[in-house]
Image (tube, rainbow, N blue to C red):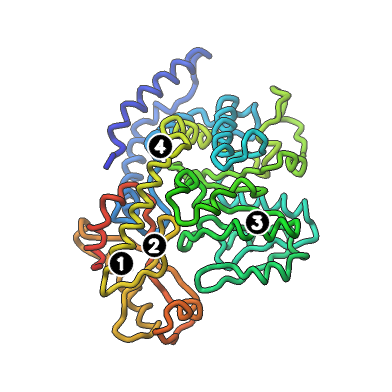
Amino acid sequence: MNQFSPYIPLLKQALRKLDSWRSQFGEDSSDFLDNSGQIENILSQLSERLEGNYPFHHPSYAGQMLKPPHPVAWLAYTLTATINPNNHALDGGPPTSEMEKEAVKELAKMVGYGDKYLGHLTSGGTIANLEALFVAREIHPNQSIAATSSAHYTHRRMCHVLNTKFLEIPVDENEIPDFNFIEKHAEEIGTIVVTMGTTGLGTIEPLSKILDIAKKHSIRIHVDAAYGGFFSLIKNDLPKSKDWDRLSEADSIVIDPHKHGLQPYGCGSILYKDPSVGKYYKHDSPYTYFTSEDLHLGEISLECSRAGASAAAFWATLQMLPLTEPGLGSVLRKTREAAVQFSDLLKESSSFQLYQEPDLDIVGYFRIPESAKTSEINKLSQSLFEDGMSRDNLSDSYHLSLYKIPADQFIARFSEYKADTDHVQILRSVFMKEEHAGFINDLADRVGI
């Protein structure tokens, strides 16, 4: 596994080159160097504090959606942060604004939007989804925004922020939306959110079917692909490829580069198929926009200040791993392979049960209890969750996460169990590091599968 230390000389070299550029403007009155001893002491303390983190860098960590960024990303971010450009306007970061436009163009190409689109980076998926729902409200101000009960809670929350009615679409035990419910409420719905990779189990919602219904009723479609968006690069390897084939028909799409795009937090993105929605962002500022007549990023964003370092980091990563199947797709293929391998081991196990076949790289499962009660599943899941993190031998430790499912939804799938709790707590493993592909057997041994 790559460690970050070997990259320090590369960063020093790049900093020296940037210092040469700085020196052309004359003497710098900064007194940072006078405080180098104090800074060294603070960084030493910081390093010790950071050791309190879980091992996000190691494949034994298969808990939440966390992993270190690609080395080229954090190097580019760190280098650019020494200048601290602001991508709200071209005045604040001319080079990084261009890098953002180039990177967003690649995202638009990846989802099939072609040359006509509107988009930019954001500080994360929450703000990106807020912008998408803001535009949805402006287009259909008197209609509801609908999303399934499996969708991220941010959609309901942002509808509250926007003072817009939110309509929850029920799902069955397989997380399939109630299409009759959508048809019944079609007149009151202005936009439907379709999640391509739920944050719970990575489920791909039936975009193709929902698009057909939406087109019939002139309903807009917003795709929340914050987690799953980059998997479109390997869509032919996925079980629901027909839904990925129609991604370009969505009116707006959110994708988070700080998840499978190997970026530092926070880096999200929003794309619109119709660039004319930029009119809903229209505003004026008396002091920022004077160096260019071109449309700048601040004119198509609800956010104001945004880190130019994020754009530089994403741009740099795309130079090494372009948005192609052999490029970034090769990383995603490994994470998908890891999930399939782990699922196969669960299906062969006599002591564990796979909850459902994974659509992406998240696997849900539970230990089979002696008594067929949901409360016993909950106890075993909690015990395994705590066991992995509490082992004295760190080389034998593991990190999982827990996922709650309504009891009636669980029983509909596993009728042999008796529901004596409101929810069933199962285990959840997120295999979003490419190193997981070579670690599955070891992890399974540690968990006891």
Q: Residue 78: image x %, image y %?
A: 43, 33
Q: CA distance from mark 1 to mark 4?
A: 30 Å
Numbered disc 2: secondary structure? strand
User: In the drawing, what numbered circle is on residue 363?
Assistant: 2
- Residue pointed to by mark 4: 326
User: In the drawing, what numbered circle is on residue 346?
Assistant: 1
- Residue pointed to by mark 3: 211
User: At label 4, which amino acid type do we have?
Assistant: Pro
Q: Is residue 31 left or right of residue 161?
A: left
Mark 1 or 3, closer to the camera: 3
Crowd class of label 3 (few under 14; some 14 to 19; many from 20; radius 10 Å): many
**Which residue appears at 53% of the width and 14% of the height?**
25
User: At label 3, which amino acid type do we have?
Assistant: Leu
User: In the drawing, what numbered circle is on residue 222?
Assistant: none
Numbered disc 4: secondary structure? loop
Q: CA distance from mark 4 to mark 2?
A: 25 Å
**Which residue appears at 31% of the width and 41% of the height?**
44
Q: CA distance from mark 1 to mark 2?
A: 10 Å
Q: Residue 86: image x %, image y %?
A: 59, 33
Q: Is residue 86 above or below residue 352?
A: above
Does label 4 or label 2 sit earlier along the sequence? Answer: 4
Do the residues bearing badges 1 and 2 touch, measured as CB atoms within 8 Å?
Answer: yes
Does label 1 or label 4 sit earlier along the sequence? Answer: 4
